[in-house]
Image: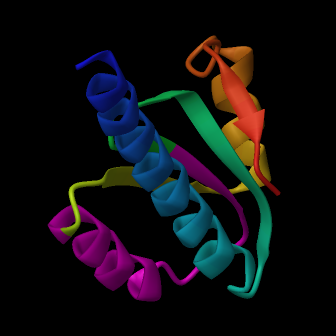
Amino acid sequence: HENEKVEFLRTLFEEEIDAIAEFTKAAEILPRVQSIILYGSAKKGKANILLIGESINTTPLEQLKANLKDKGSDIGFLALTREQYDRMVTMGLYSGEKKVLK
């Protein structure tokens, strides 16, 4: 039974990583995306991602987000300019764990 539990957890983890990787791959090819940041730690099919850049068209990512949600992964994202992000960091709003994906 222990092996079944380990395999189940591995499957959940792999799907989560795949969702983040799939989202990142789609986001990094969008024009004007300068940085992609995983904010906080990814948890069991859920992650929050910050897109940093100028006038980012997030419409293509909305459909991907819906597709990933259908597969059990909830990716929340927010597009900010570099200036907005820097100001929010200064104010302590993004003081938690961060991992730069691009």
Q: Residue at x 52, y 60 (%)?
A: 18
Magenta-highlighted residues:
49-70
Image-quadrant location for residue 10: top left
Q: Is residue 57 magenta?
A: yes
Q: Position of residue 23 (x, y in %)?
A: 53, 68
Is residue 55 shown to the viewer in this render?
no
73 horizontally vs 59: left or right: left
Residue ID at (77%, 79%): 32
**Front residue of this view, candidates 8 and 29:** 8
Which quadrant is the C terminus positioned in? Answer: bottom right
| Residue 89 on image: x %, y % | 70, 23
Q: Nearer the viewer, residue 58 or 8?
A: 8
Decide which of 28, 94 is in the foreground and name it: 28
**Residue 26 among magenta residues:** no
Q: Is residue 47 left or right of residue 26?
A: left
> Quick check: 6 left or right of 26?
left
In the picture shown, does residue 44 fall above or below 71?
above
